């Protein structure tokens, strides 16, 4: 199954065109992997995006994030041989281990301590209920290669000069998209309207990767202010 960023960027426009009769420019908001899909959509049809608001998207992963990625691929059996005809158990031990690990990497320690283990368990249950091991493995293998046209750094170079303006948001404690790499992505995207340039990147203190959940009101207000 093709779940590449190129495919998902094209699917974005197919869904949008089917749902809305609008061939003008749009504003797109994306978080984490959704932010990378938004960038892929911008690369696919760069003249159709006006504003781009991205949270938790870095130019590149640092070494710690690479360690996380390798561990997740191992948890999901990236090196296993797929056996056709064998029904996959959705809620298996590997999928649960992956869910726990990615949640621990996504949220700050303070936030997880405040919500408690019982609530986090419900999130793990949700990941296992609505995803499959093979589906998540395909996404990791096809969209996290680290090289080529569809890395954030490469996409930023292709988008440069097309998107009218952008806003990047990152948590100060983000383990998956380090703030310094988010700032580098801003540099790769290039200059924009001088009145907006100083506000193109925002670091939210004491938050991990999941700024839209840890600082919900702040993030929502930031998005609304930017797109309006």
Image (spheres, grey):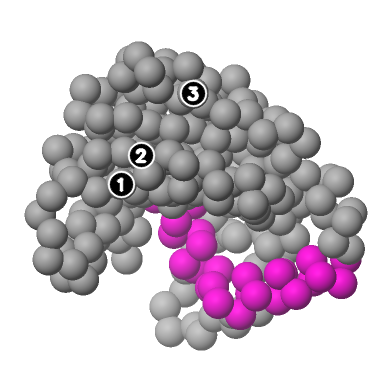
Eyeballing the image, is 108 above or below 66? below
* Residue 73 in the figure: left or right of residue 166: right
Classify mark 1: helix, strand or loop.
strand
Q: CA distance from mark 3 to mark 1?
A: 17 Å
- The C terminus is located in which quarter? top left
> In the rendered image, which residue does mark 3 sit on?
199
* Residue 123 in the figure: left or right of residue 29: right
- Is there CB contact under 8 Å for labels 1 and 2? yes
Q: CA distance from mark 1 to mark 2?
A: 6 Å
| Residue 67 in sight here | no
Residue 193: x percent and y percent?
Answer: 31, 19
Of marks 3 and 2, the one in the foreground: 3
Residue 10: x percent and y percent?
Answer: 21, 54
Q: Nearer the viewer, residue 134 or 42?
A: 42
Q: Quadrant of residue 156?
A: top left
Residue at 55% of width from left, 51% of height from top? 220
Q: Quadrant of residue 101?
A: bottom right
Residue at 55% of width from left, 47% of height from top? 221
**Range covered by the magenta-colored residues:** 117-145
User: Predominant secondary structure in magenta?
Assistant: helix
> In the rendered image, which residue does mark 2 sit on?
52
- Is there CB contact under 8 Å for labels 3 and 1? no
Q: Nearer the viewer, residue 31 or 142?
A: 31
Eyeballing the image, is 162 above or below 190? below
> In the rendered image, which residue does mark 1 sit on?
27
């Amino acid at each position: 199954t093709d779940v590449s960023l190129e495919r998902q960027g094209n699917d974005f426009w197919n869904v949008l065109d089917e749902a809305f009769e609008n061939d003008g420019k749009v504003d797109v908001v994306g978080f984490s992997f959704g932010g990378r899909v938004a960038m892929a959509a911008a690369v696919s049809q760069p003249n159709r995006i006006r504003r781009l608001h991205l949270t938790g998207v870095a130019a590149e992963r640092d070494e710690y994030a690479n360690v996380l990625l390798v561990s997740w691929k191992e948890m999901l059996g990236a090196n296993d041989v797929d056996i056709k005809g064998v029904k996959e158990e959705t809620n298996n031990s590997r999928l649960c281990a992956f869910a726990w690990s990615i949640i621990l990497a996504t949220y700050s320690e303070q936030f997880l301590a405040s919500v408690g283990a019982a609530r986090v368990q419900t999130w793990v249950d949700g990941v296992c209920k609505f995803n499959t091991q093979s589906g998540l493995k395909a996404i990791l293998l096809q969209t996290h290669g680290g090289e080529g046209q569809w890395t954030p750094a490469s996409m930023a170079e292709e988008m440069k000069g097309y998107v009218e303006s952008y806003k990047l948001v990152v948590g100060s404690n983000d383990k998956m998209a380090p703030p310094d790499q988010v700032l580098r992505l801003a540099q790769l995207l290039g200059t924009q309207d001088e009145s907006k340039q100083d506000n193109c990147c925002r670091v939210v203190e004491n938050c991990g990767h999941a700024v839209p959940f840890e600082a919900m009101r702040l993030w929502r207000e930031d998005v609304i202010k930017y797109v309006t």
